[in-house]
Amino acid sequence: MDIIGAILLLGGASFLFLGSLGLIRMPDVYNRIQAGTKATTLGTLLVLLGTALIQPQWSLKLLLIGVFLLFTNPLSSQVLANAAHRSKVRKSELTSIDDLEADREQQS
């Protein structure tokens, strides 16, 4: 179990590292939010799972942290993206689809 836990910890750390690279390399705030959220959610869940395999007595606490993370991380990124869109934060020239704007036009 220790070896599998260590592999999961390494995989989680790799996803967290790739998420931090995405924050630097993505062209606009919307892409950065997506890169940061997806990579950190998966990376943190892998770290929690690896820790649970190494320290089984912490499993319940780590499970609760993981469930909390699954609910709050995507929700917070959606709220941040919505706030940036309402504030008219400029999109990259590479961004061609704006579903949020299309939804707002449909509601009007």
Image (cartoon, rainbow, N blue to C red):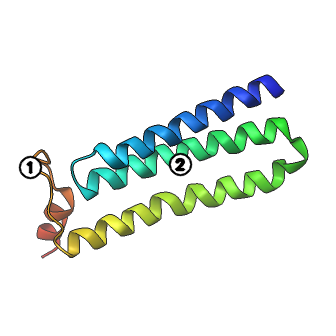
Image quadrant in which you'd find residue 104: bottom left
Does dot 1 land on a helix, a strand or a loop? loop
Q: Which mark is residue 107?
A: none
Q: For the point 14% across and 63% down, which residue is it?
A: 90
Q: For the point 14% across and 48% down, which residue is it?
A: 95
Give whichever of 4, 23 is nearer the camera: 23
- Identify the amino acid type marked 1: Glu
The residue carrying mark 2 is 41
Is residue 1 shown to the viewer in this render?
no
Q: CA distance from mark 1 to mark 2?
A: 27 Å
Looking at the image, residue 73 lies above or below residue 84: above
Does dot 2 land on a helix, a strand or a loop? helix
Give whichever of 15, 52 is nearer the camera: 15
Image coordinates of residue 97 in percent, x first then y, are: 14, 50
- Identify the amino acid type marked 2: Thr
Characterize the local packing of mark 1: few (<14), some (14-19) or many (20 or more) Cα atoms within 10 angstroms. Answer: few
Q: Is residue 42 left or right of residue 37?
A: right
Q: For the point 27% across and 46% down, which residue is it?
A: 26
Image quadrant in which you'd find residue 78: bottom left
Task: Say whether marks 1 and 2 touch (CB < 8 Å).
Answer: no
Characterize the local packing of mark 2: few (<14), some (14-19) or many (20 or more) Cα atoms within 10 angstroms. Answer: many
The residue carrying mark 1 is 93
Image coordinates of residue 83 in percent, x first then y, are: 29, 73
* Image quadrant where one finds the C terminus: bottom left
Q: Nearer the viewer, mark 1 or mark 2?
A: 1
Is residue 62 shown to the viewer in this render?
yes
